[in-house]
Amino acid sequence: MVIKNIQSLRFVAAFMVLMHHTLPPNVHPAHYARIPEAITELSMYGFSGVDIFFVISGFIMAQTARQSHGGVLAGLEFIVRRFLRIYTGYWPAFFLILFLSIWLGIFQGPEISRWASFFLLPQEKYLLNVAWTLTYELLFYLLIGGILCLTSRRAMAVISGLFILLALYVLVRHQQGFYRADNSTQWRLVFDTFLTSPLILEFMAGYLLNGFLQRFPRQRLLFWFPFAMVMTAASVYTQKWGGLQGVGMAAYLYYPERALLFGSAALGWVAVAVIVPEGRSWFFRLTQKLGDASYALYLLHIPLLVILYGLLFPRLGGLLWIGGGKLSLLLYVSTCIAMSWVYFRLIEIPLHQWSRWFVTRLFHRRNMGRSSVSQAPQ
């Protein structure tokens, strides 16, 4: 399996989310007036980059769990290691958005808890609005860690069983009309919105895909590429012409449909990425490098949106109006990519190295001298 292609797909997913958040009202419609329609149209579906991230996360966690011998200590180590991986990358971005929130008086309200946002505890709204996806990540890590505490050999079978049970639960709740706007006040935040969310199925699907490809490695691109294309087309068609309310599958009312459609499309593209030969061109090598910084890009693009469009660009004369918003959008995207690489190299890697040293010291004191640290944290 070509794991390096996964890094390219990570960058694509992060870039999709970034472009989605450049749409009005995040950027004033007057400053987006002459952006090419093709860019606007593609950005409308950028939220599905999250689905790609979820499937990739499940896929990579299967790789990681396969290396574990199981047992309570192994399960706890997995949880601590993965939690620190999320937190050490997230907290610097959290403090940046916290500073902006206090300074500018934005992202405030009784529905936003700063402490819950700091620890990524389940809530309706987060200080850094993309952080809700990280709560799902942590819950999935808890699930995998819990399974490893009990067994490692049967982890794939346990995930398969849980996938079936959760899919049936979501199907029954959907048939009961649970996912409706007039039922939104009945949601029990932790259980219904997070623990039994249809989006958890995407993590599990990625995990199971890894096991499937390990057992049957000789997969045909002639199947997976058309599958990914068909599911992508079905997802786009349903989102645009399916008569959905509001923002459609970007909102929780249509999470079952999103997991089925965009989740299946994401599963197909992840399968394609690990089946096709590794890209050798400069473009693929560049996207692989940028994929290393995809977590930083995902975290930083909202604070940079506030800084550039809210503070800097309005002070630069008519920059926002040059080319009907084309120049400012290009500067924003370029700055996000450049700053995410700086963040990755100077902040994320050192903190990740520290976290790995800490976990090694905590769980493997005798083997500290033989431990190694990756330069591209996954």
Image: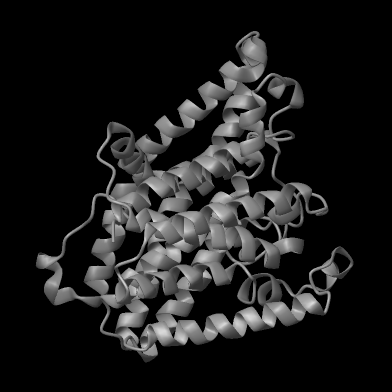
Does 178 appear above or below 123? below
Does 277 appear above or below 44? below
Q: Quadrant of residue 123?
A: bottom right
What residue is shown at x 49% (from left), y 71% (from top)?
A: 205
Hey, which residue is sitting farthest bottom in the picture? Answer: 150
Hey, which residue is sitting farthest top in the picture? Answer: 317
Hey, which residue is sitting farthest left in the picture? Answer: 369
Q: Quadrant of residue 64?
A: bottom left
Residue 213: x and y in percent read 34, 70
Q: Quadrant of the C terminus?
A: bottom left
Residue 320: x and y in percent read 65, 16
Q: Is residue 201 visible?
A: yes
Q: Quadrant of residue 31?
A: top right
What residue is shown at x 64% (from left), y 45% (from top)?
A: 45
Number of callouts in the render? 0
* Residue toward you, 139 or 324: 324
Q: Is residue 20 left or right of residue 301?
A: right
Hey, which residue is sitting farthest right in the picture? Answer: 182
Q: Is residue 181 left or right of residue 156?
A: right
Q: Quadrant of the N terminus?
A: bottom left
Residue 300: x and y in percent read 50, 40
Q: Is residue 105 left or right of residue 84?
A: right
* Residue toward you, 296 or 356: 296
Picture colour scheme: one colour
What residue is shown at x 32% (from left), y 43% (from top)?
A: 288
Residue 356: x and y in percent read 27, 62
Q: Is residue 127 visible?
A: no
Does 237 appear above or below 371? above
